[in-house]
Amino acid sequence: MTVLVTGGAGYIGSHLVHALADAGISAVVIDNLSTGHSAHLPPSVPLFIGDAADENLVEGVIAAHGVDAIIHFAGSIVVPESVRDPLGYYRNNTMVTRNLLATAVKCNVGRFIFSSTAAVYGNPEHSPVAEDAPTRPLSPYGTSKLMSEIMLHDVAAAHGMRFVALRYFNVAGADPAGRTGLASPGATHLIKVAVEAATGQRASIEVFGSDYPTPDGTCIRDFIHVSDLAEAHRAALAHLRGGGASATLNCGYGRGYSVLEVIAAVKRAAGTDFVVRHGPRRPGDPTAVVADVTRMRAALDWAPEFDDLDTIAAHALAWERHLIEREQRLQPQAVSA
């Protein structure tokens, strides 16, 4: 039995592929490499460069590798970009999922794990937020993911498919072994931006809003280490292969950190200071978004290993320094006159 991982060369996907390989679980990857990196994959895992919406490609991979489960990461994730290009997001997220589900049904693949997001909740009325909270996304990104969840429910009901939809909160950190991490240019993740400032790649970091009703006035978010998130996917796979029921689950730690607490953790990890500028609030930013993880802890055989903000910051910083060193090695040597 083999797992097909779409978007498996991306940030979260590559961490999962390494986790599968480490556990001796057979996997195959489809990725168009628009944001992924083939070098971040284990050499033993086959990579097919192409679109997860290409039904002929997916059908061929399923048949050739004996795929019994699909873990679907492929998609676009930048919220402001989704506002500028909603049709692109409905194509890359919703329509791709539709085609992938159609191929899964055609090929009798009855297990499906979907990469969803806490953005489906929008600005939640209560925190921690549970899975049965109202879904009111504030962006085409969140809407595109919610539409995909709805399709998944309907397909499961019509065709007997079993699924796990994992709603991520704030994913951060990098593989402790340094094999993969976040390498997308122009990333907007808070910890990624902070480690870029700590390594001198940014002149400063801007904090959007310092007048929220929180202890230090800045927003609070639930950060989960990417390696723990990868293990949650592996646990979801074991759940489905073991006959477990379909489920929609929050993925976080169930506690939050403020923006200033995150920045302080990065400064501690780097042993250096950098400029922090304070700007106005961004429209639509909720005060606090923390996951209620009761359901995930009950449904999956999963426990976090890296539930520590300083560890998350240290791993992200180590990966960023690795990227800088790699870029320096690739630069052509200056030729003396």
Image: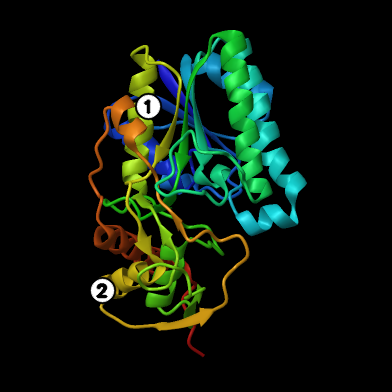
**Residue 282 image point, x, y percent:** 60, 68
Q: How is the image coloured?
A: rainbow
Residue under label 1, please give it.
236
Return the disc, 2 or 1, that comes first in the chain's sequence: 1
Q: What's the amino acid at mark 1?
A: Ala
Of the pair 261 and 102, the residue shown nearer to us: 261
Asked if residue 170 can be seen in this view, the reply is yes
Residue under label 2, please give it.
268
For the point 32% across and 35% down, the residue is 294
Of the pair 326 and 200, the residue shown nearer to us: 200
Lateral position of residue 307 relative to residue 7, left or right? left
The tag on residue 85 is none
For the point 37% across and 72% down, the residue is 260
View extreme (right): residue: 87
Looking at the image, residue 58 lies above or below residue 313:
above
Can you tell which quarter of the image residue 3 is in?
top left
Q: In which quarter of the image is the N terminus?
A: top left
Label 2 crowding class (10 Å Cα cut-off): few <14, some 14-19, many 20+? some
Asked if residue 52 can be seen in this view, the reply is no
**Residue 42 image point, x, y percent:** 37, 39
Of the pair 135 and 190, the residue shown nearer to us: 135
Looking at the image, residue 239 lies above or below residue 15:
above
Q: Is mark 1 on a helix, strand or loop?
A: helix
